[in-house]
Image (tube, helix red, strand yellow):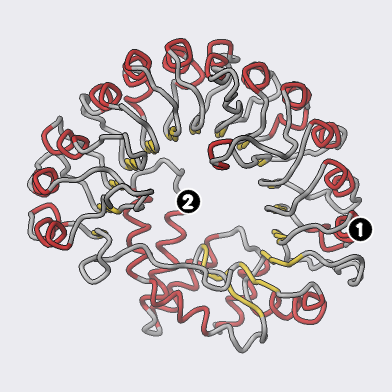
Amino acid sequence: MSREVLWEAIRADPEDDTVRLVYADWLSDRGEEEHASLIRTQLRRTQLPVEHPDRVTLELQEWSLWRVVHAIRSGLKDVATGVGWGDPHRGFVDRVYFGDPLQWAALGPRCLDRTVVDHVVLPWARLGNVGPLPAHERLRELSVRGTVVDVSDVEWLAASPILSTVKRLNLVRSDLRDEHLRVLLGSPHLGELQVLRVPYNHLGDDAIEALVERDFEGLVELDLSTTTFDDFQSQGRDALTMTWRGAERLAEWPGLFSVQRLNLDGQQIGTAGLTAVLQSVCTPELRHLSVRGISDWDRGAGDRDDVLVGFAQANPELGLVSLSIGDCELTEDGAAAVASSPVLSQLRILRMGQIREPWEPAFQDLGSAAFFEGLAVLHVDQITGGDAFWSRVLARESQWLHTLSVSSFFHWAREDDLLQRLATGPVQPALRCLEVVDVDLSTDSLLALGHTQSLPALERLAISGLGYGSRRTSRPSEYQAQQLRGTPLAARLTSLELGHRELDRLPRPESDPDG
């Protein structure tokens, strides 16, 4: 069986992993073992749920094969000139970048017919200077980048048959407005859509009205996120967002029945809007929710809504697997509502941060939440005064927590004892990945970590600093890095990243250079 025959079989059924594994065996028989290993490793990782601990190990195995990635991309250069290629996914490059929409008609079919690509990235056409883009039966994902100049740009995309096979549509930072989304959703070519991502645009309640008027069947992911107030680091926002009224309309939409992932970051829906979403009977499949910064800081009043109290009124039939609640106030009531909410009893992934003035009782309540017993991934960033929180979270011996990521670059944050807590606290038998960014460090804490017996499964340790403002860098010094490298923990790690390239071992690769 030839390479081309196998590739054609993969192109004919891109969702089937069986033929990809047959191709991996074919490569092994011909001595291309690293390429075969990349295929098998990526397939195993994507087949696992996002909270599975083996994903950490498999990702590190991918990093060790990164030179194969560059070889694979280099081998595609003869397919078409002037295009960029993404990284392999499930063993094959699945994404191609075009610098101009006109390239699609000229080179698009060639790229899709000679590779396993099913994702195309294009810039917006300008003011009608490009005709409607033709369809291709193998295209499944489309990303359009750049800024919309005129509504005619969106009309061009809506009229393009290229959308007819697209299941995943990404329009990121395009300066889309409500009227633009209405035009796009009016396209007759969107019948196959399963994923709609329109983050970092300027969409308000009218955009939600346009969305709920559309009868989507089988939509599994909806990303309506925008920039949060804390990301601005300014006196306020100047762009339109949703309000609680838009959130209530969305919560009533039957199109949510199949949605598994919903991202509302930055949309100013407040307590009422979040409560409506959490109470919705139209979200039986929702498992992943992100609601960072859904209430801006009111500098005049000196506070912002305690949106997290909405979890006290959530539909008990809702069962979230992952939750992001950064950029929110954490009052005692809000922390208690999150800690006791039955919709979080199966929570596996929690991301939280940018929580202003976290009073100690609130942190104690949240850190004592029962769902921490089952967490597999915990990301905590930009929190001040978290001693009470960490004393509760790390006091338990977690059988599931495999990834812990902590950053704290505010100059008043003191998290140096976090490493000491990990080094001297209860055994964390499942922890495989520890990322610490811009946390105050001492040589003693690093050495304590390096000699600990409490992290028997750790495979990756990454410690770096951001150099925030005038604060001293929290990256380990070269002396500290050398000292840590000589410890028993460092000796057995697969990946060690200390911010000194010459001392790092298997650092995160720089991927997707063409993107």
Determine the CA span between mark 1 and mark 2.
41 Å
Q: Amino acid at mark 2?
A: Gln
Of badges 1 and 2, the one in the foreground is: 1
Residue at x 67%, y 28% (from the top left corner): 268
Please provide percent x and percent y for residue 415: 25, 36
Quick check: can you spot residue 178? yes
Q: Is residue 323 visible?
A: no
Q: Pick whichever of labels 1 and 2 is earlier in the sequence.
A: 2
- The label shown at residue 152 is 1
254 or 36: nearer the viewer: 254
Residue 430 drawn above or below residue 119 = above
What secondary structure is found at the residue carrying circle 2? helix
In the displayed orientation, state which residue is furthest to the bottom.
78
* x and y, in percent, of residue 29 in the image: 39, 81
In the depicted structure, whether residue 362 falls above or below residue 446: above
Q: Is residue 63 left or right of residue 223?
A: left
* In this picture, residue 369 sits left or right of residue 102: left
